[in-house]
Amino acid sequence: MKLNLLTNINTATDLEILRQQLLDLENGLFSTKKVDKRYLAKFFTQENYDFFLQDLKENKITISNIKALNTFISSILKHISKLPKVHFTFAIQPVKKTLQEISNYISTTDKKYIVSFSVDPSIYGGTIIMKDGKTFDYSICKSIEPIILKSRLS
């Protein structure tokens, strides 16, 4: 399933915000009898709202059909729960633009990756990448620590 909603979802935080918006809408549908665009807009950021409307149109889901809307939301939630994730450890806090560029670089047209990150100053620089249960250490920690240790002993 191709979803316009995923266009601006690059990080685990972005994904969690969207997931919560969808869950809130799903819960809201149980307590309402009438759904229109104004009702839907209450649950989303403007950008996610616009993408959600596009997805409804492309998937031929009528806003007023609450059952179809619920089914569609459930399928989106199921889909986003299965998105592959890549975790990066950086020595310093990356800016959002960097995370977006990383996500765009590693995501292909047929597969989207969600980027999460942590900060660990002890790696000094570079990054450590965890993907599919494998760790790839591109930090400079291993090459710098012997130099630091040698200088301390001198």
Image (cartoon, helix red, strand yellow):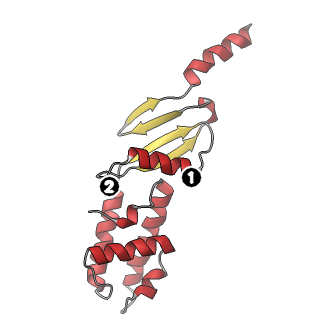
Instruction: Locate residue 35, reporting x and y percent.
Output: 38, 88
Q: In the image, which disc is placed on residue 96?
A: 1
Q: In this view, does 141 lie to the left or right of 134?
A: right
Query: Closer to us: mark 2 or mark 1?
Result: 1
Q: Which amino acid does label 1 sit on?
A: Lys
Looking at the rendered structure, the kind of residue marked 2 is Lys
Q: Is residue 27 left or right of residue 89?
A: left
Label 2 sits on a secondary structure element that is loop
Give the percent coordinates (x, y) of residue 9: 44, 59
Whether 139 is drawn above or below 147: the answer is: below
User: Which residue is depicted at the point 28% across and 86% down?
Assistant: 65
Instruction: Classify the position of the N terminus by image quarter.
Output: bottom left
Q: Which of 20 and 101 is in front in this view?
A: 101
Tell me if I can see residue 23 in this picture.
no
User: Is residue 1 placed above or below 22 in the rendered structure?
Assistant: above
Q: In this view, does 59 lie above or below 147?
A: below
Q: Residue at x 57, y 19 (%)?
A: 143
Secondary element type, mark 1: helix
Circles 2, 1 touching at the beta carbon (< 8 Å): no
Mark 2 or 1, nearer chain start: 2
Q: Residue 82 carries which label?
A: 2
